[in-house]
């Protein structure tokens, strides 16, 4: 039973390595239930918080994550929003950055922490990184400032001592414990002996705003990575799919594409059809600047939008989110180039 002044945290367990066990016959790691995970973290009972857990049934490897799972998580947070001070989502690392990005768009007006974490080694194993990630995430989700406001009322990823804005993250390592990086935005906090928050970087909702969940996603989109030798016949057949509503073009450097007339015609034609086409760079660090080179300017003239320094994970989910709102095309395009959840830095910011 919760004491009225007690901080309360809701854990949403979705699966992932953190809670997995090894199948004796196949030797492969499989998702397991939350009780198994809780049993391996007796330290949880040392917290002075009221902690409850909900499992997304069945727990999954995050490679199986779908927009419908994001919607379920968003609705769970909405349903429990008034009861809890903060939320911790346990999630597989493979698509964690997509989930974090999707939730940052879906949970509008969020004023409470949603900290997503997982691990590279299951929590039942001796050298697990899961315990530290899990326990510190709970502490961050519960942290408040002197006025009693949440320290980080954002959707974040906590991993290997770093708290990052969720929609700025990318998984960069399939082996090491430092699995995530936020290349284009500094960390919101670093956990050492103390947890040091960079409070001026934290995004806060305008005062008085209420949580509003928008969970519709339109996934009629595609990501196209440019490479030397890309072929017209193959790309055209992909982009001629009638239901297509959005294309994310992964270009070179500061947003450049080869100067092939067929490519420009294909892109112009897409934009004329009302398909939203946006330019993000294949580089991990830095921003698209379409006026820098002739090879970028031609994309701008074809009607391609600037994705600035957005990660691919944030751009995929932002596009699904904006298309899911069924706004007039001009408004969708306008919002694509705006910073709506801290996911991009505009040149004048
Ligand atoms: N395949 C796992 C998952 O994403 C990997 C992990 O959790 O680290 O669910």
Image (cartoon, rainbow, N blue to C red):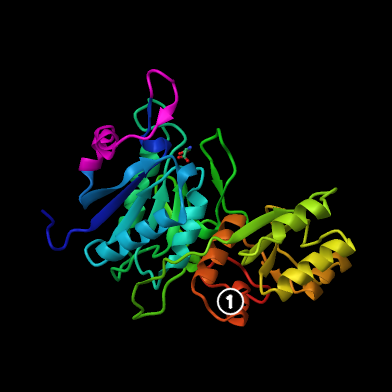
Q: Is residue 281 in view?
A: no
Residue 305 vertical placement versus 254 (above, below): below
Image quarter in which the C terminus is found:
bottom right
Query: Where is residue 117 shown, x and y percent of the image?
Result: 42, 47
Left or right relative to 65: residue 184: right
Q: Which residues are magenta?
A: 23-45
Q: Which residue is mark 1?
A: 332
Left or right relative to 120: residue 2: left
Residue 249 vertical placement versus 60 (above, below): below
Residue in the picture at 57% in, 61% down? 220
**Res. 78 image quadrant:** bottom left
User: Of residues 347 and 313, which is closer to you in this image?
Assistant: 313
Residue in the picture at 70% in, 70% down? 306
User: Of residues 232 and 16, which is closer to you in this image?
Assistant: 232
Left or right relative to 249: residue 176: left
User: Of residues 61 and 283, which is closer to you in this image?
Assistant: 61
């Amino acid at each position: 039973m919760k004491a009225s002044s007690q901080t309360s945290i809701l854990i949403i367990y979705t699966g992932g390595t953190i809670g997995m066990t090894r199948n004796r016959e196949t030797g492969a790691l499989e998702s397991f239930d939350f009780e198994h995970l809780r049993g391996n973290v007796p330290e949880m009972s040392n917290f002075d918080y009221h902690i409850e857990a909900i499992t997304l049934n069945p727990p999954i490897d995050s490679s199986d994550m779908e927009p419908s799972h994001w919607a379920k998580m968003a609705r769970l947070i909405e349903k429990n929003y008034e009861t809890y001070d903060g939320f911790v989502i346990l999630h597989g690392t493979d698509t964690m950055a997509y989930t974090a990005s999707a939730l940052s768009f879906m949970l509008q007006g969020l004023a409470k922490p949603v900290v997503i974490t997982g691990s590279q080694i299951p929590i039942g194993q001796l050298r697990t990184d899961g315990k530290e990630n899990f326990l510190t995430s709970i502490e961050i989700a519960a942290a408040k400032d002197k006025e009693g406001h949440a320290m980080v009322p954002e959707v974040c990823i906590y991993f290997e001592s770093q708290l990052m804005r969720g929609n700025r993250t990318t998984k960069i390592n399939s082996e090491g414990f430092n699995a995530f990086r936020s290349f284009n935005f500094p960390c919101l906090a670093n956990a050492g002996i103390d947890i040091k928050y960079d409070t001026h970087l934290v995004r806060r909702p305008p005062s008085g705003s209420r949580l509003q969940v928008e969970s519709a996603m339109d996934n009629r989109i595609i990501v196209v990575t440019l490479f030397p030798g890309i072929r017209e016949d193959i790309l055209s057949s992909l982009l001629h799919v009638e239901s297509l509503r959005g294309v994310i073009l992964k270009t070179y450097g500061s947003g450049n594409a080869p100067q092939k007339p067929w490519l420009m015609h294909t892109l112009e034609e897409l934009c004329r059809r009302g398909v939203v086409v946006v330019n993000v760079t294949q580089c991990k660090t830095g921003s698209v600047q379409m006026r820098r080179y002739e090879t970028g300017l031609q994309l701008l003239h074809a009607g391609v939008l600037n994705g600035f320094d957005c990660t691919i994970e944030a751009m995929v989910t932002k596009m699904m989110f904006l298309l899911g709102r069924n706004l007039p095309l001009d408004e969708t395009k306008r919002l694509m180039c705006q910073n709506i959840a801290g996911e991009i830095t505009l040149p004048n910011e």
